[in-house]
Structure formats: structure tokens, C-alpha cells
Image (cartoon, grey):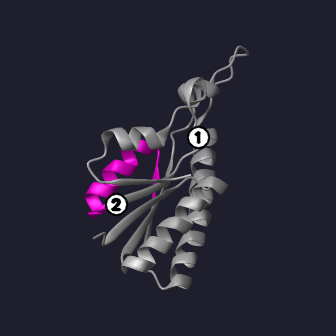
């Protein structure tokens, strides 16, 4: 059935539920796993304020290094959990990308036949204001998506 499961995480407590569920499924199906974490581009809108401050190259590089370090820690923790369960796992950090687009792209590139990700399950205005990467993946992915709450 599913032989390669892509598990998306953002490092949150909720995303950990997706990791746990995806790993349990992978173990039961003897599937391999790719963990993916996407970090967004430097928030340009936050770079300029009324006082006239504009982010410089050092600010952007510090942001990118911080994101890389954060993602590396999350992905290594996920890889260790997979190893402990006897599940073969790769990790992939995609920097400077929009999450939904990157998740769909990497799932197709790596030949994943299932995407597992978590969702808060927000409705109405909360979903509109906060956005939902999960909804974007569900809407645009050709690969089946399992949503964990």
C-alpha cells in the first residue's frame, strides 16, 4: 500500500502528533519515511518599520542560520525516533520556501505515496486569518494526504 511516507513537521507539539502517527503507520507497513521541515523566507514586511529600520545582510544571514539550526534539531530528533522504532528515515530541510508548495514538491520528487501532517482544525475566521498549510497541501497535492489532529 504505502511504501514511502513523507512526514511534514514545523517543530510544534501538534506536529509531533503527526510524526508519532506517521512513524506508527510506517512501522506497521514496513514503509520508509522522509521527514521534511520547511522554513519560510526572512519576513520582509517585518524588516521595515515606521522608524526606517531595514534588515541588513547580517540580519538575514543570522535569521537563516537560526532557522537551519532549529530545523536540524527537530529533524534529528525525528530521525532518532524513527531509528528507535526500526523505521528507515531520511530528513530534508527546505529553507526559504513556502511550506505547502515545498511539501508537495518534495513529496513528488522523492516518490512519496503518502503525506502525513498535522492540523489544528481551525474553522472560519481563525483559518482565514492564520492560513492553513495543511489545507493548501490537501487542495493541491496529487499525493494522498493523511491529516492528524
Q: Residue at x 37, y 43 (%)?
A: 138
Above or below — where is 72 with respect to 108? below
Q: Would residue 98 be visible to someone looking at this image?
A: no
Q: Position of residue 46 (x, y in %)?
A: 63, 27
Which residue is found at the position 61% from the left and 28% from the top?
126
- The answer to whether 117 is drawn above or below residue 139 in the figure is below
- Which residues, given as a range, are shown in magenta? 93-113
Residue identifier under label 2: 114
Could you tell me which residue is drawn at 68 percent across and 23 percent down? 53
> Label 1, label 2: how many angstroms apart (C-alpha)?
34 Å
Which structural element holds mark 1? helix
Residue 35 x %, y %: 46, 64
At x 34%, y 55%, the residue is: 106
Q: Quadrant of residue 50?
A: top right
**In front: 49, or 112?**
112
Front residue of this view, candidates 149 and 117: 149
The residue furthest top is 50
Is 67 displayed left or right of 103 in the figure?
right
Can residue 130 be seen?
yes
Q: Give the percent coordinates (x, y) of residue 119.
A: 54, 46
User: What residue does disc 1 label?
Assistant: 60
Secondary structure state at the residue bearing disc 2? strand
State whether residue 80 is above or below residue 146.
below
Label 2 crowding class (10 Å Cα cut-off): few <14, some 14-19, many 20+?
A: many
Amino acid at each position: 500500500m504505502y511504501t514511502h511516507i513523507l512526514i511534514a513537521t514545523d517543530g510544534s507539539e501538534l506536529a509531533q502528533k503527526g510524526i508519532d502517527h506517521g512513524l506508527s503507520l510506517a512501522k506497521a507497513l514496513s514503509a520508509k519515511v522522509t521527514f521534511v521541515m520547511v522554513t519560510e523566507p526572512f519576513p520582509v514586511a517585518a524588516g521595515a518599520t515606521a522608524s526606517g529600520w531595514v534588515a541588513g545582510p547580517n540580519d538575514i544571514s543570522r535569521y537563516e542560520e537560526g532557522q537551519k539550526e532549529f530545523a536540524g534539531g527537530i529533524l534529528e530528533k525525528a530521525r532518532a525516533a524513527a531509528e528507535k522504532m526500526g523505521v528507515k528515515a531520511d530528513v530534508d530541510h527546505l529553507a526559504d520556501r513556502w511550506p505547502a508548495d515545498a511539501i508537495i514538491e518534495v513529496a513528488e520528487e522523492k516518490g512519496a505515496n503518502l503525506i502525513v501532517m498535522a492540523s489544528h482544525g481551525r474553522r472560519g475566521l481563525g483559518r482565514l486569518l492564520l492560513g492553513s498549510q495543511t489545507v493548501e497541501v490537501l487542495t493541491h497535492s496529487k499525493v494522498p494526504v493523511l491529516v492528524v489532529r
